[in-house]
DNA sequence: CCTATAGCCTGACGGC
DNA sequence: TGCCGTCAGGCTATAG
């Protein structure tokens, strides 16, 4: 699930539920999501502290702890947060649970264990070390920056949008939506895009991500004209009715309309 | 530099 | 019903 819009929704959810409450306990049900840290070390850094604020960069979420340091969260393909009071009937389905002194719990779910939670000293250093590009919704990430970046790359346009070291936040689903709305085939070489196409791509990237956040990243609430609610092989294109095509790019499925997005 | 592939993991689904 | 292969919205390492 989690690309930029999803993680932004998680951030707002965490901000509205979990800030300024004393952390009374941390339960780790699977150490794989911790990377290298031990549960005891994580507990030491969190217990008795409070979350004060959070910031998102691409698909990463960083939560500040009072007294110093951050908690870094990544959600892999199958992660989300849930905040609850009543004892859950299956608490083990959360890979990690953070209990607050008000009796509520913040659960981190990650079915396939592809997500990570770990202490982070400084988000800026983390972003550098992991070679993450600028967040695509950062106000400083303007059309000019985008153009320069894309034109200097030789890959196909879908791979460029999804390359986190070029720009951070876009994954498989939203790249399909952005390309559909910009009427570009995913395999168009990035350095072959002309100025109007680059502008289209940039403005659609911005509007798709912002609108998706406004829809709480819920496909059921997205506009009917979007690809996402119809993103399956053979489904009619919401614009022209032609059957949506499924192609493989980098081992993963990309969906596009063969009519509206003619091949390179 | 770029692409393709496998691997990490679990669970849902379709076909036989 | 049971088994098997495939696929799933991420990222990394490796080979070509």
Image (cartoon, coloured by chain):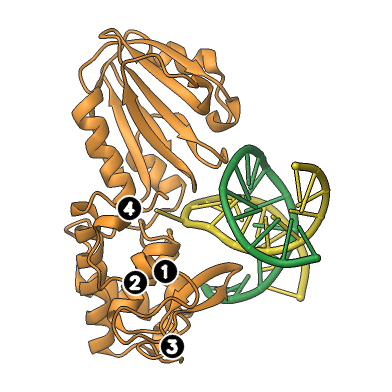
Chain colours: A orange, B green, C yellow
Q: Position of residue A69 (x, y in %)?
A: 34, 24
User: Can you tell which mark lies on residue A258?
Assistant: 3
Element type at mark 4: helix
Residue labelled with disc 4: A4
Mark closer to the chain start, 1 or 4:
4
Place residue A60 in its image quadrant: top left
Q: Chain of mark 2?
A: A
Q: Position of residue A158 (x, y in %)?
A: 44, 74
Compared to A169, does A180 lie above or below?
below
Tell me if residue A58 can be seen.
yes
Q: Position of residue A74 (x, y in %)?
A: 43, 40
- Mark 2–mark 4 CB contact (< 8 Å): no
Q: Residues within 10 Å of mark 3 (few under 14, many from 20)?
A: some
Residue labelled with disc 1: A231
Residue labelled with disc 2: A227
Mark closer to the chain start, 4 or 3:
4
Q: Are marks 2 and 4 on the same chain?
A: yes
């Amino acid at each position: 699930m989690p690309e930029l819009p999803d993680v932004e929704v998680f951030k707002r959810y965490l901000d509205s539920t979990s800030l300024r409450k004393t952390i009374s306990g941390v339960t780790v049900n699977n150490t794989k999501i911790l990377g290298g840290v031990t549960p005891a070390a994580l507990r030491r850094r969190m217990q008795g502290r409070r979350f004060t604020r959070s910031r998102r960069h691409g698909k990463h979420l960083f939560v500040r702890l009072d007294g110093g340091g951050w908690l870094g969260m990544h959600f892999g393909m199958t992660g989300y947060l849930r905040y609850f009071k009543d004892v859950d009937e299956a608490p083990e389905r959360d890979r990690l649970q953070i209990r607050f002194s008000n009796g509520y719990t913040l659960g981190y779910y990650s079915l396939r264990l592809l997500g990570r939670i770990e202490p982070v000293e400084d988000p800026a250093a983390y972003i550098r070390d992991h070679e993450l590009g600028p967040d695509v919704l950062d106000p400083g990430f303007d059309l000019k920056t985008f153009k320069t970046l894309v034109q200097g790359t030789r890959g196909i346009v879908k791979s460029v949008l999804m390359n986190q070291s070029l720009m951070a936040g876009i994954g498989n689903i939203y790249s399909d939506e952005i390309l559909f709305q910009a009427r570009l085939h995913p395999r168009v070489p990035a350095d072959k895009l002309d100025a109007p196409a680059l502008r289209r791509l940039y403005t659609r990237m911005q509007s798709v991500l912002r609108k998706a956040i406004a829809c709480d990243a819920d496909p059921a609430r997205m506009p009917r004209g979007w690809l996402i609610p119809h993103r399956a092989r053979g489904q009619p294109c919401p614009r022209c009715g032609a059957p949506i095509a499924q192609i493989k790019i980098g081992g993963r499925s990309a969906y596009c309309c063969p009519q509206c997005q003619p091949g390179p």
